Amino acid sequence: MTNRRKFITQAAALAGAFSTSSLFNQLHADEWAQAAKKIDHLSPEQVATDEDYWSTIQNAFSVSPNIINLNNGGVSPSPLVVQQAVARYNDLSNEGPSYFMWRILDQGREPLREKLAQLAGVDPEEIAINRNATESLNTVIYGLNLEKGDEVIGSKLDYPNIIQAYKQRAMRDGIVYKQLSFEFPIENDEQIVKVYADAITPKTKIIHVTHMVNWVGQVMPVRKISDMAHAKGIEVVCDGAHSFGLMDFKIPDLGCDYLGTSLHKFLSAPIGSGMMWIKKEHISKIWPLLCNGDPHSGDIRKCETLGTRSFPIEQGIGEAINFHEGIGSKRKEERIRYLKNYWATKVKDIPRVKLHTSLKPQFSCAICGVSIDGMTPGELDTALFSQYKIHTVGIVWENVSCVRVTPHVYTRLADLDKLAHAIEKIAASKKT
């Protein structure tokens, strides 16, 4: 019986996430199909408010009942089906690591590459699979053939690891790194584009833009920035860490040349998984971050020379894609935006409370910043957790000072009601 059970486990793992016997198909396909029949006639915006439908999705997660996790902008939990896939692949790997990892699971990278490319709307030959957005974007930043005096334009509100990468290139290679400043929220695309355009000089080679600013959730007009930059012969690097797997778009919609993302955020893939995209005509000129035998190859796989990696985590991405597609990109985006606006609308008019994020759909989606007069972000974050067991994150960075709140598809309205109540009570307690 034990041997039979082990054989079944091995066979299921080897079949992979994109077979009819995938874990998602086994655990969710029929139930979700029945749930979808009831809402197929509704628009994504209407589905966003259908609690019966979303309860089916919520039940697929194993989040702790002891805390309300509203820091999904940092890292999102994986649904059970993804956790089980990783565990299954890990068990299989440990039965004979050098065999099952290198000769079996390693063969699953190409089907996974094709599925990620399909989700991203690009050629599979432009996709590299790695560990997170930092690794993806550092590969591009250090791989670009920039020389002393060449200029890169970024923002003070880009992600710190990316800022430090450009600063190190400035120290090491003498490039000029310019950082723009913004006062978010901004509800005018042209205003943002103009700030980038005004910073351009004849020496500007690269513009770096964050699609969804991680501090406060501002959605940047990447396509308009890209079109402006390309008209001046400038390439665009896009940080898609918080937008990919959340917003309903394809990478070509952004018009950029390079993009990096973390798959363990809104795609809910295993923790420690990421993806890099490079437009095909640029691949050969990008040096890989980790040395490769043919660094000038036009094969994107030169950027996957990581040595031994976590094959279970990598292969677990497939079930996360199944889960995501089982919901639908647009439905998912609208649901999470609805959740953000649900709590933010409840608190925006409370005395002493301030929102740091637009509630208009074209300028935000999941992330929203909030503050209370007379409290530091750390104090508000501590009060939310110590008094109400609501987990958020305090943000103090450049000109941003707030608590970042980020729901996900598993978040229940009752939890957001509790958040709104908590903010109201805490704000009232701080009256002078």
Image (cartoon, helix red, strand yellow):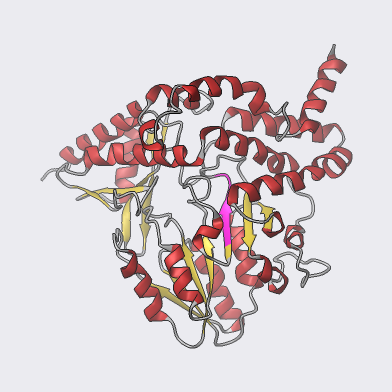
Q: Residue furthest front?
A: 41
Q: Is residue 28 visible?
A: no
Q: Residue at x 66, y 71 (%)?
A: 143
Measuring from the top left, give residue 77's x and y in whole percent: 53, 36
Q: Is residue 163 visible?
A: yes
Q: Residue at x 59, y 28 (%)?
A: 80
Taken as a whole, is the magenta stretch helix, strand or loop?
Answer: strand
Q: Is residue 262 magenta?
A: yes
Q: Nearer the viewer, residue 411 or 424?
A: 411
Q: Residue at x 69, y 41 (%)?
A: 313
Measuring from the top left, give residue 123's x and y in whole percent: 67, 56
Q: Nearer the viewer, residue 64 or 199?
A: 199
- The C terminus sits in image quarter: top left
Q: Quadrant of residue 81?
A: top right
Q: Residue furthest top?
A: 1
- The N terminus sits in image quarter: top right
Question: Is 143 located above or below residue 346 in the figure?
Answer: below
Q: Residue furthest left?
A: 432
Numbered label tally: 0
Q: Tell me: 128 left or right of 92.
A: left
Question: Is 271 located above or below residue 21 in the figure?
Answer: below
Question: Is 8 located above or below residue 121 in the figure?
Answer: above
Measuring from the top left, give residue 105's x and y in whole percent: 80, 40
Measuring from the top left, give residue 170's x and y in whole percent: 55, 79
Q: Which residues are magenta?
A: 259-264
Q: Is residue 131 magenta?
A: no
